[in-house]
């Protein structure tokens, strides 16, 4: 996949994530503890786009065999785990939301690459 496709995926998946995140915060947490989200989405989408491009920054796509350690299934599992943890913590500590946005973009970059013919290396 090229960089524009990864950026597009990062933006789309961020808005899906942000919708669910804001729904949970505004419908459940705000009445309970007073947490609300203002304009955090702008920084979140920027970090999601940065995260979606990061694997190709670390391992540039000079040819179709560029996928190595940072494009592996092991890193996909790692980034999914970090995203899950930071997404839950981010519900209560809004600053952690930004970390989850970065790992969301990284994770979906790898998921998109896993759907290509080359796929992802095992580890």
Image: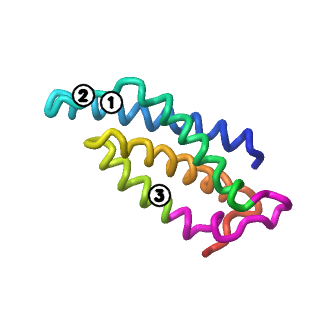
Find the distance from the CA under tag 3 to the CA under tag 2.
25 Å
Q: Tell me what residue is drawn at x 43 percent, y 58 percent.
A: 82
- The residue beneath circle 3 is 80
Q: Tag 3, which secondary structure?
A: helix
- The answer to which of marks 1 and 3 sits earlier in the sequence is 1
Is residue 36 rendered to the left or right of residue 109? Answer: left
Find the distance from the CA under tag 2 to the CA under tag 1.
6 Å
Q: Is residue 89 above or below residue 114?
A: above
Q: Which residues are magenta?
A: 60-77
Q: Is residue 41 above or below residue 101?
A: above
- The answer to which of marks 3 and 2 sits earlier in the sequence is 2
Is residue 102 rendered to the left or right of residue 60? Answer: left
Q: Is residue 56 above or below residue 77?
A: above
- Queried whether the magenta region covers residue 92, the answer comes back as no
- The residue beneath circle 2 is 27
Q: Is residue 35 above or below residue 77?
A: above
Rate crowding at label 3 as few (under 14), some (14 to 19) or many (20 or more) other CA atoms within 10 Å: some
Q: Tag 2, which secondary structure?
A: helix
**Tags 2 and 1 in contact by the CB under 8 Å rule?**
yes
Q: Tell me what residue is drawn at x 61 percent, y 47 percent.
A: 52
Residue 57 image offset from top left, x and y in percent = 70, 54
The quarter in which the C terminus is drawn is: bottom right
Q: Tag 1, which secondary structure?
A: helix
- In the foreground, 92 or 110: 92
The residue most toward the top is 38
Count how many numbered circles sit on residues in the image.
3
**Tags 3 and 2 in contact by the CB under 8 Å rule?**
no
Q: Residue 23's mark?
A: 1
Residue 74 image offset from top left, x and y in percent = 55, 70
Q: Tell me what residue is drawn at x 56 percent, y 36 percent.
A: 46
């Amino acid at each position: 996949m090229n960089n524009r496709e990864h950026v597009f995926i990062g933006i789309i998946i961020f808005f899906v994530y942000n919708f669910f995140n804001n729904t949970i915060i505004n419908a459940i947490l705000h009445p309970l503890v007073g947490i609300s989200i203002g304009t955090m989405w702008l920084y979140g989408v920027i970090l999601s786009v940065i995260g979606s491009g990061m694997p190709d920054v670390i391992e540039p796509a000079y040819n179709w065999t560029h996928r190595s350690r940072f494009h592996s299934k092991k890193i996909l599992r790692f980034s999914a785990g970090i995203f899950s943890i930071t997404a839950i913590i981010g519900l209560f500590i809004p600053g952690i939301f930004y970390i989850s946005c970065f790992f969301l973009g990284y994770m979906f970059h790898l998921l998109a690459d896993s759907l290509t013919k080359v796929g992802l290396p095992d580890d």
